[in-house]
Amino acid sequence: ELFDIIKKPPGITELEISNARRIIEPIIVDTYSLFDKKLENGSDWRIIGHQVNYNPKNLDGIYFALGIGDSCKKKDCYGNDFLISESEWKTLPKLSPKGGFDIKKRLEIA
């Protein structure tokens, strides 16, 4: 999840985390290229906070599509898979990791 806290110095308080709000729908983030390898030029993505026992809210109805043809499925944020039609598959975000370019594009729209 991406929240409404964007900072240059990588520090954050527990109160800021508690009051943070989601700015876009949850997406699958390519953590390896963004955080571990920092493969995208001009980007410096960092995790600036962590909340112990975090329990995300408002995830019902958020799905990601995977599969092809008669094997189309949607996966919810809890890891459950459901068979779906190809026409529904076309309407859902795909279950694939997003890099910095994709995330920045989503943030511009938000």
Image (tube, rainbow, N blue to C red):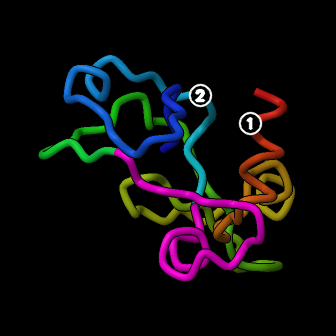
Calculate the distance from the C-alpha at mark 1 to the C-alpha at mark 2: 8 Å
**Residue drawn 31% across and 34% down?**
12
**Considering only vertical position in the picture, is 13 above or below 10?**
above
What percent of the width, then of the height, locates residue 35? Answer: 50, 69
Left or right? Give the position of 79 relative to 103.
Answer: left
Residue 30 among those drawn in magenta: yes
Residue 26 among those drawn in magenta: no
**Residue drawn 85% across and 57% down?**
90
Residue identified by numbered label 1: 107
Our reading of the magenta stretch's main secondary structure is loop
The quadrant of the rendering that contains the C terminus is: top right
Other-residue count near label 2 (Cα within 10 Å), few / some / many at <14 / 14–19 / ≥20: some
Residue 43, quarter of the rendered image: bottom right
| Total tally of numbered discs in the picture | 2
Left or right? Give the position of 22 relative to 83.
Answer: left
- The disc labelled 1 sits on which kind of residue? Leu
Give, as a single range, the part of the protein colored magenta: 29-48
- The disc labelled 2 sits on which kind of residue? Ile
| Secondary element type, mark 2 | loop
| Secondary element type, mark 1 | helix
**Considering only vertical position in the picture, is 81 above or below 47?**
below
What percent of the width, then of the height, locates residue 38? Answer: 60, 75
**Residue drawn 76% across and 61% down?**
85
Instruction: Pick whichever, 39 or 91, lies toward us.
Output: 39
Instruction: Pick whichever, 72 or 8, lies toward us.
Output: 8
Instruction: Pick whichever, 110 or 84, lies toward us.
Output: 110
